[in-house]
Amino acid sequence: MAFRFEVEATKENGRAGRLATPHGTVETPVFMPVGTLATVKGVPQDLLEELGVEILLANTYHLYLRPGVEQVRRLGGLHRFMSWSRAILTDSGGYQVFSLSDLRKVSEEGVAFRSHLDGSSHFLSPEKAIEVQIGLGADIVMSFDECTEHPASRERARESMELTLRWAARGKKQFEEHKHEVPWAGERGGDQALFGIVQGGMHPDLRRESAERTVEIGFPGYAIGGLSVGEHRGTTREIVEATLPHLPKDKPRYLMGVGTPEEIAEYAGMGIDMMDCVLPTRAARHGLLFTSEGKISIKNARYAGDEGPLDPNCGCKVCSRYSRAYLRHLFASNEVLAMVLNTTHNLSYYLDTIRSVRHSIKLGERAPSLTGVPPQP
């Protein structure tokens, strides 16, 4: 199945669609769990399927370092390697390289960096990033971009934006020349989709320019990158609002690295089609759980004798079986099962949230409040 996107309903509260990929159809708006190392930490693939995950995200930088793209390619690509038959999106590695700070050096050609694992030297160019992602075999691959730091001057943001645009053109050329080499494609080939990424820092006019020029290069989908890097939530919203009108209405729009359940509901309502975030899994490992009654820190002693379910309004297998007291006991005892159950619930809550939003969009209704309190600006 070749890549295809169709908008099925456009309402004041967002839009709903279907994203066809070589590994299944994805209903949008969609939240993509993050499986950095070809695994969503603590959750096996069969449980992800049971939760209704249609697409997940894997990390190019980490998989490039370990186990290595050639190893994954020899094993039949990422889908076969991790025993996942549904869609996968790989990020380009740009954000991870950005986060290395002192371990990297950016040039026109690409980024020289040292591995956080063993200090070994590596070089990632726009062409190399595409080569790695083709080798991994994800359904959707991302352009290699420079994630602009925050705060950044206007001059610095423009410089970074221009570099990302040049890298996008180079990456697209590499992709067009080698897209038939994806491990699972066989004779068919060419079914992967390459998305462009909009940058421009926290400057709305630069974001508009970046969007327009990225669209000129031409991609089947577009991402808004470089957010959630320390800016105020209101600034994030402002940038998204400034960018969206300049992206094609007939192409998927992906907001990278956001956010809380309230935020993903809010951005879906603005017309974002795809989102990802490490928050539900990372928070779970620290005992922070999302519920219809607000956030709960399960480590608190107040839950030691609480026989009630984690979230009385949640039908996930965790809430239907285990008490808050038991979940608190597992976490306090540093049991591995605590991470598994906490992550299962948080992912279920996120996925239920986006399903509820998608349903509301189709009906043309305002999405229900997640905690009984309207989302704050």
Image (cartoon, grey):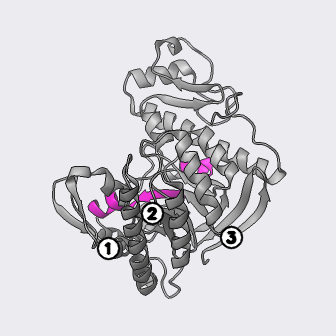
Position above or below: 324 against 192: above
Picture quarter with the C terminus: top right
Q: Give the number of the disc on residue 372.
A: none
Q: Position of residue 42 (x, y in %)?
A: 43, 42
The residue that appears at 67% across and 58% down in the rendered structure is 28
* Residue 235 horizontal side relative to residue 52, left or right: left
User: Which x, y percent locates residue 128?
Assistant: 32, 73
Q: State the residue position of label 2.
A: 90
Secondary structure of the residue carrying numbered label 1: helix
Please tell me which of labels 2 and 1 falls first in the chain: 2
Picture residue at 62% right of the left edge, 77% below the top = 1
Identified by mark 2, the residue type is: Thr
Say which residue label 1 marks: 128
Q: Amino acid at mark 3?
A: Asp
SS state under label 3: loop
Q: Identify the residue under disc 3.
A: 250
Query: Is 356 situated left or right of 202 in this image?
Result: right
Left or right: residue 126 compared with residue 365 = left
Q: Which residues are magenta?
A: 47-66
